[in-house]
Image: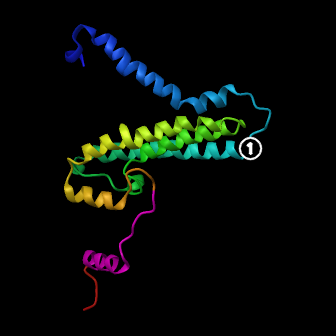
Amino acid sequence: MRRLHGDEFWIMSLFKVFLFQAAVMWVVSWPVQWAVTTPSDADLGVLDFLGFVLWAVGLAFEAMGDLQLVEFKANPANAGKVLDTGLWRFTRHPNYFGDCCVWWGFWLFASATGNGWWTFIGPGVMTALLLRVSGVPLLEKTLRKTDRATRRTSRARASSSRCRRVRRRPRRQRWATTVAATGAGPE
């Protein structure tokens, strides 16, 4: 950007980078703003509880996913491999899944005020950005550089955009793998 705009770099970066990010963050944070600034006479209800649970699950996914990735990358034997254990077994991007849960949890808090339903736009924008623009697509592009066999196995086992049940190997294949690993079997 600096090379492209020369002396006008500072004004271009102000508008193209910083003000754009500020506008996006303003929209994404609507549920938080609404929940904090809207008075409510009602006690905490079901939506508040569900919002807290979803927020806590999201925060746990982000924290545990990041910790598992740091531990995986610290092992030199894992160079060029794709993490597919722990939370990474269920989704290839547990931190993005967790981030989406956190923002939708905030939306539930805003909805609990009675008229904050319209703030769904905030977590919707964040989810779209993570799944279609800046999160998953950029990371998937980086993952293409890893070992093809490892990447293919990881893609077959875990979704890139959501948490899902792990596909299990057929019973016969599990038995054959166990027999091959232990050396036991029919003689």
- The magenta-colored residue range is 164-182
Residue sitting at 39 percent across and 66 percent down?
167
Query: Going 72% across and 37% down the picture, which residue do you hit?
Result: 114
Q: Is residue 73 left or right of residue 97?
A: left
Mark 1 residue element: loop
- Residue found at x 60% / y 33%: 31
Q: What is the count of numbered marks? A: 1
Tell me if mark 1 has few (under 14), some (14-19) or many (20+) residues whose alpha carbon lies within 10 angstroms of its own: few
Query: To which quarter of the image does residue 55 belong?
Result: top right
Work out which quarter of the rendered image holds the N terminus and state it. Answer: top left
95 over 148 or under it: above or below? above
Image x and y of residue 157, in percent: 35, 61
Give percent across and percent down for residue 150: 24, 57
Amino acid under disc 1: Gly
| Residue 17: % across, % down | 36, 21
Q: Which residue is mark 1?
A: 45
Tell me if residue 73 is in the magenta stretch.
no
- Give above or below for 66 relative to 150: above
Residue 170 covered by magenta stretch:
yes
Judging depth in this view, the residue of 78 and 55 nearest the camera is: 55
Residue 117 is situated, as x and y percent measured from the top left of the image, at 64, 38
Q: Of helix, strand and loop, which mostly describes the magenta segment? A: helix
In the picture provided, is 113 more to the left or to the right than 178? Answer: right
